[in-house]
Image (spheres, grey):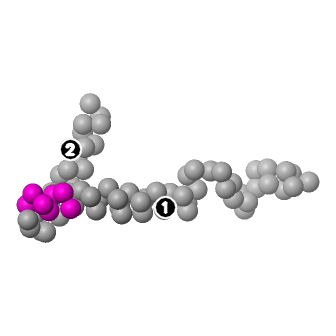
Amino acid sequence: MGQRLTDNNPNIKDLSDKNRPTKLAERYSELYDNEWTNAFKDLNAIYNDEQKTIAMLPVILTVSTFIKMC
């Protein structure tokens, strides 16, 4: 009976789905909290200027994306 209620029912959440909205939000939050914070800290140690560091973060992201495509 329970299986019939959940099969193809869009109102029942599949808790094993890695890409459900709450899991995606959690992963995005971890990315920001960990990766971007570390990148900011490392770049700020080089530039010693918060504005320059902030300006460099998108550049680093673009370079990283380009390298992954190669």
Question: Which residue: 13% across, 69% down?
Answer: 50
Q: Residue at x 35, y 59 (%)?
A: 34
Q: Is residue 69 left or right of residue 18?
A: left
Q: Position of residue 10 (x, y in %)?
A: 71, 57
> Is 68 situated above or below 39?
above
**Magenta run includes residue 45:** yes
- Image quadrant in which the N terminus is located: bottom right
- Find residue 44 and report its horizontal and vertical position in percent: 14, 62
**Quadrant of the image for the C terminus?**
top left
Q: Is residue 51 left or right of residue 60?
A: left
User: What's the residue type where badge 2 is placed?
Assistant: Val
Tell me what residue is drawn at x 17 percent, y 52 percent: 59
Q: Which numbered tag is attached to residue 63?
A: 2
Residue sitting at the far top: 70
Q: What secondary structure is the magenta-colored segment mainly? A: helix
Say what amino acid the circle numbered 1 marks: Glu
Q: Is residue 27 magenta?
A: no
